[in-house]
Amino acid sequence: MSEYPDKRYLELAEKWLLGTISPAEMAEYARWYNEIDPGAVLEVPAQSATDADAYRLKLLGKINEKRRSGRAHRIGRWDWAAVAAAVLLMAGMGIYLIRRPSAGPPRYAAIPHSQHDIPAGGNKAVLTLAGGKRVLLDSAANGTLAQQGSSQVRKLTNGHLSYLTNREETGASPSFNTLATPRGGQYSLTLPDGTHIWLNAASSITYPTAFTGKDRKVILTGEAYFEVAGDKERPFRVFIGSPTGLEVGVLGTHFNINAYADEGTIKTTLLEGSVRVSKGDHSGSTLLLPGQQAQASPGGSLRVSTDVNTEEVMAWKNGLFQFDNADIQTVMRQLARWYDVDVSYEGHITEDRFAGKLPRDASAAETLHILEKNQVHFRIEEKKIIVLP
């Protein structure tokens, strides 16, 4: 058990409880926990789930009491479990493990300090205009970028692209634009009809610069969240990959589609309104209600899940990683897309399951420090993360 200055750990504990802790301080606090109590299994006390505010004040009072009395230069097992419970319940910025039994003694190792720490992703995207011209949005100046038919294409602040249409186009075939994010990028978009779209990393959406005809069609790869503008006369349709793939049809609603090729299953999660999900080969169709998720795998039929953690689904849009009983491969796929890294595994791959939340604005090393627990360690080499036993 390592020594730790009394004032420092109390300061970090208080910041964590108050939700003011920085990513670097959070990583320091997690590393300290790994050192002092490697065998702890964290549980949230049942009473805290029904009286969160009172429980938080109780914990904060206990920390202040220790500061005044000068007792104990480190937090013991019970104190850490209580603080961690508050973190998971209130601040929501922690990761804990759901551990499987281990045949051998636990092993621990800190992530080696590396000058090649990888920063978090950010607002990065490439806009491909009709005719093939490409605009790198993260370096383009704010303001009008192009005129596409009847739509004025504008780059706004905070990573947002907007199409402003002054008149309805008729007759001529619409031209198409594509917004694509790289690994380590995200971007948001307002279509000519007022629909808002948020693109996650390594994703793209192709759409007309003006909606004509009887419906509104877009093509998606990767992941996106939609807030569709209502229009009873023109349904909004999202095609996954191509017009012959999965189709999501709506009038006006909020939903998320995760269609990454390496995830194996296309997931459509409804937050508000209703959507109809159909397979292009006409092998299945289902109508979703809020809180439900349609899952489609290649060659398989559609299935609907009613036990969906919508907060976990929407975490990426809200600036978080969130895991609920996720294996290490699932965790690392998300990290690979956001930090623009390759991932490899050496030796035994842990069977631990992960649950909790982490901020997406932390660097790769900070995130890995928090993830690093029993039987899983990491090494960063240039643009690669190696998962170690």
Image: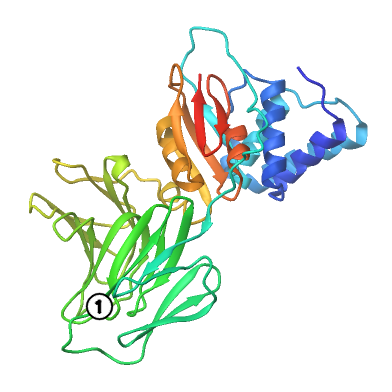
Q: Is residue 317 rendered to the left or right of residue 275? A: right
Residue 279 rendering spot, x and y as whole percentages: 14, 53
Q: Is residue 10 above or below residue 216?
A: above
Compared with 144, 364 (above or below) is above
Quarter residue 51 falls in = top right
Q: Residue furthest bottom?
A: 167
Determine which residue is flagged by label 1. Answer: 175
Q: Is residue 94 left or right of residue 281?
A: right
Quarter of the image that includes the N terminus: top right
Rendering coords of residue 114 (x, y %): 65, 34
Q: Is residue 223 visible?
A: yes
* Residue found farthest to the right: 69
Instruction: Please say which color scheme the image uses.
Output: rainbow
Left or right: where does residue 224 sit relative to residue 92? left
Residue at 41 percent across and 32 percent down: it is 329
Residue 5 x/y as whole percent: 86, 30
> Can you tell which quarter of the image residue 82 is in?
top right
Q: Is residue 51 visible?
A: no
Amino acid type, mark 1 = Ser
- Please tell me which residue is depicted at 16% across the width and 61% down the height of the picture: 243
